[in-house]
Image (tube, rainbow, N blue to C red):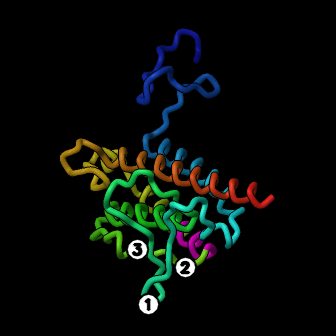
Amino acid sequence: MPSGAAPVENRFGGRPAVCQDRPVSVSRRDLLRWQFDLTWSLFELHLEQLKPEDFLWEPAPHHWTVRPGGEGAWLPDWDEAELDPVPVPTVGWLSWHIGWWWSVTIDHARGRTPRERVEITWPGDGEAAVAWLRGLREEWLAVLDRLSDTDLDAVAPFPWPADSGMTVAHMLAWVNAELMKNAAEIGQLRLVRAASAA
């Protein structure tokens, strides 16, 4: 910062960012987009390494997976009760789970009637699942790119109740966190399976 210049308040708290002696301001949307892009790039490292047999590999006897259902649809294992212990999900189940919450979030963000969980099925194989997730990424980027600061301050339509006080900015941060968590779970399963086969 140039000598004698007053510090610029950083909207994210802490010391202001500085580049070439000038304060740098990053919009909330740009910061959330940067975080999403970082998370996705880490996820891509695993997506590129997944093998077809990784998706339905059962990591433990007590697990959740996706199974062929009627009319060619693949359905996820599900229980409304809080199970203890929690079943260990397969990569296939986790890829369906990402597709489910992300599809519903996109529905809400675009003002569409959100689909029910039972309406969202797994594509049927690993290659199709990866293509589905990459397609959802493109849809999400289109949502992000149209948002203004005013949009970010609006009440979040999902995943909280309308009176929660959460905003669309919170929803974007939740997507980033949820994707990071699920990507780490898929990555860990991929690594464990590869190490077990070595």
Residue hosting label 3? 120
Q: Is residue 137 visible?
A: no
- Secondary structure beneath dot 1 equals helix
Which kind of residue does numbered mark 3 sit on?
A: Ile
Q: Quadrant of the C terminus?
A: bottom right
Q: Find the residue positioned furthest to the top.
A: 4
Residue hosting label 2? 124
At x 36%, y 44%, the residue is 170
Q: Are marks 2 and 3 in contact (CB under 8 Å)?
A: no
Q: Is residue 87 left or right of residue 184?
A: left
The magenta segment is 126-133
How far, Cα to Cα, is label 2 from label 1?
12 Å
Q: Position of residue 122 (x, y in %)?
A: 49, 74
How far, Cα to Cα, is label 2 from label 3?
12 Å
Q: Position of residue 12 (x, y in %)?
A: 43, 30
Q: Which mark is residue 71?
A: 1
Say if 172 sits above or below 94 in the image.
Answer: above
Which kind of residue does numbered mark 1 sit on?
A: Glu
For marks 3 and 1 on the same chain, the one whose residue lies earlier in the sequence: 1
- Secondary structure beneath dot 2 equals loop
Rendered image quadrant of residue 19 = top right
At x 29%, y 65%, the residue is 111
Determine if the magenta segment contains residue 191: no
Q: Is residue 16 left or right of residue 81?
A: right
Q: Position of residue 35 (x, y in %)?
A: 53, 45
Mark 1 crowd level (few <14, some 14–19, many ≥20, 10 Å Cα): few
Q: In the image shown, does 21 or 51 lie closer to the viewer?
A: 51
How far, Cα to Cα, is label 3 from label 1?
14 Å
Rendered image quadrant of residue 157 = bottom left
